[in-house]
Structure formats: C-alpha cells, structure tokens
Image: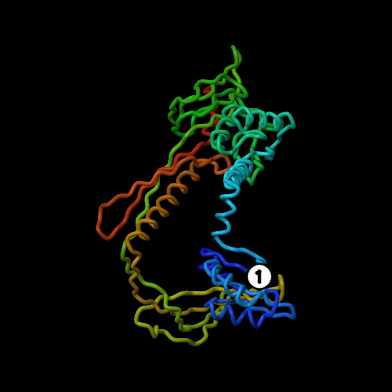
Amino acid sequence: MKTDPARLVKGSLEIRAEGDAGSFLDAALNQGLTLTSVRLDGQGCTARLAYDELPQLRRAARDSHCRVRFVRRRGLPFFLALLRRRPLLPVALGLTLLLMLFLSTLVLEVTVSGEGPLSDSELQQVLDTAAEAGLKPGATRLRVDVEEVEEYILQRMPQIFYAEALVRGQRVELAVVRRVDVTPTEQVKPPGNLVALSDGVIIDVLVRRGTAAVKSGEPVQKGEVLIYGTYGREAVAADGIVTARVWAGGYGECPVKETGMLRTGRVAWAGMTITLPDGRSWSLGGRRESPYALYGREELRASTVLWRNISLPVEIVTTVFYELEARTVLYGEAYARELARRRAELDAKKELFSRYDIAVTRIVETRVEELFLEENLRRAAVTIEARTEIGGFQAAAQ
C-alpha cells in the first residue's frame, strides 16, 4: 500500500482493538474516526488512523468496552519525540555522516603502471616522488592536487616524459611513460650539435652526450643550439631530450545562415561502359540529358570479382545523374559560434601535429578568441599550447 505523505507529516497509528469488533467500529463511526486498512479476525480487528484522532479513539474504546493497544507509530511527531528523548542522536548521525564522507576521500592504495623499459627501482622512485608531493596511502584527496603531483613527477624525474594520476574511488593509479633511450644499434653519428627545430620555451633538458647550452625557462628560436657537441676537449655527437613549450594557431568560421547545394537522394541511370584489357569498350544505352533541373554527374568504377581473389580483367563504368537542391541551413548564433570554435581548434591541431611528433606532444592549454567582423559570419581563432621535444641533430661543419 502506498504511504500518504500527509499522514507521514501529521503522524499515523496502527492499532489493535481486542473485543467486540463490531461494537468498536460502530463507536468509531459515531466518534467520527477515519479508519483505514481495517482487518477483522475472531478476537478483534486492526486498523490505521491519524495521530490527531487519538482523543476520539479513547472515547470509542471506552464506549465499546474494547481494549486498544498501539501496534505501530509512524510519522514526524513520533520522530521529533524520539529526538527530544535522545538529543544527542542527531549529533551522532551528523558526525557519522561526516566521518563516512571523510573516509571516502582517503587514498588507500597508490599503484604505478608504465610504458617503456621501466625498472623496479624506477617504479618505486615514481611512488616515492608522488609521496613527496603528498600523494600516498592515508592522504585525503581533498588536500592533494593531482595535476601538481603529475607536474612534480615530471620535474623530478627527467626520464619520465608523461605522467597522469587516474583516481578510481579510493585507489589512485599513476600512469607514466618513460623516454626511449638511444640503443647501441643506432647508427654512429658524426660530431655535431642538437639544435632547436622550432621556437619555444625550454621546460627541461636531459643530456645524454655533450654539454647543455640552455636551461629551463629560456626562450629559444629555430636553429639555436640546445646541446653542444663537445665533452671537455672532445667533439662528440650531441644527444639528449629537450622538452619545450610550443604554440600553434588555427582559424575557423561558420555562417549563421548558409545556402548550398545538397543531394536529394534521387538518381537516374545515364549509361554503362564495359572496357576490356585490349582497350575495346562497349557502351550500353542510357539517357544523355539529366531529368533534373539541378544535377551532378558521377562515374562509378568497379571490377568484376567472381570469387575471392578470382576476377575478370574487365572494368565496368556506370554513369549516373544525381539531383541537387538549393537548401538554406540556419545554424543559429550559439551553434555557429561553437562550429567556428571547433573548426579553429581542429585547424590548430592539424598545424601542431604536422610540425611535431604526435607520440611525444601533449596539449597543455587551449585558448579561444572570438572575432566579430561580419554580421552573418562567426569567426574564431584558437591558440594551442603544448609540450613536446624540439631537439634535432645537426652535424658540425667540416
């Protein structure tokens, strides 16, 4: 049975009347009681009534000479009475809830998963470095900034190129990627320097061979030496990993209202041509002129495949006319601005990944600037800031 919300607020009683059930029900009716869920048995009856009808219930029990006892009490008045008898109960409930919320924020386990040749000592070093940044078992997530932990790991461990803290409930997984070291099987390079392949601001320098020419925080230009190919008085092939902040820009636009030609889906067969390997061809009948006022022409080429890799050296070209229709698309102000932003961001990413290796490039920030030049056209310019490796080897002049 559904619970009446009004009765929960006012309070309700479930009673048991022992004695002559008929006399009790008659007396209850005379007193104006509203009884619900009435169940009769050989020794009496059970029923429900509102809490504010308690005085009438006493008179009905006295008039019918029946013994009435309470089976169940429900509703807000009884709950408030319980709180008055036990004033510390709501305090205990509140403290228990706060304790449960606090315990749910605790980090119970920190694990490391990595790609690349990571040794056990390096995995333990990642855990120790994360603990120095505040991420360790027993710490609360409310006081730990996972982005700061990631940045701290990258700063303290130059051999780690990528770090990400993945929070899964009370478990945190540190996903790291190690830089790929130079293998002995690589071709021996002549003496030379490691130079910048593009402009940027240096983040860190990991020198394998040579002498560092720049340090963290310095801006560099394309062609500037990053690592000199010298080690003492010896000329060597400079080698290392130089990570820097780089930028790429993109532009996008979208009209609020656009008119263009779209296909309606209707096509008409215009003809078919079968070409043999010796150059001879046969043309099958078809129409020369399109049945549509606005149309396009398309040739569909196909080879004849009999079964699996078995095919005939014959090419079949089918020509069709497809109908076009001039349609106007109304994007609206908000959607046109969103499309312009997406196109500008896609253009910026194309420029970024055409200049840098996508495997070692990580986007840090995306800034959007809206350009209002025409009433019907929404334009956006996007600047992407990323971190990537900008060093490239340049042999020394002979």
Is 234 placed left or right of 319 in the picture?
right
Q: Position of residue 136 (x, y in %)?
A: 65, 33
Residue pictured at 43% horizontal, 39% vertical: 247
Q: Nearer the viewer, residue 198 or 74?
A: 74
Q: Quadrant of the C terminus?
A: top right
Q: Is residue 167 visible?
A: no
Q: Position of residue 238 (x, y in %)?
A: 58, 24
Is 188 placed left or right of 292 in the picture?
right
Residue pictured at 64% horizontal, 46% vertical: 168
Rendered image quadrant of residue 396: top right
Q: Nearer the viewer, residue 270 or 322?
A: 322
Rendered image quadrant of residue 258: bottom left
- Residue bearing the label numbered 1: 68
Is 192 placed left or right of 248 in the picture?
right
Is 272 above or below relative to 328? Answer: below
User: Badge 1, how many Cα within 10 Å: few under 14, some, many 20+?
Assistant: many
State how many labels appear.
Answer: 1
Is 118 above or below relative to 325? Answer: above
Q: Is residue 97 visible?
A: yes
Q: Secondary structure at mark 1?
A: strand
Q: Position of residue 259 (x, y in %)?
A: 32, 69
Q: Given the image, on which type of amino acid does mark 1 rest?
A: Val
Name, please, the residue furthest toward the top. Answer: 233
Is 50 above or below relative to 158? Answer: below
Is 198 above or below relative to 104? Answer: above
Q: Nearer the viewer, residue 62 or 295?
A: 62
Q: Position of residue 174 (x, y in %)?
A: 64, 39
- Colour scheme of the picture: rainbow
Residue pictured at 73% horizontal, 32% vertical: 119
Q: Quadrant of the N terminus?
A: bottom right
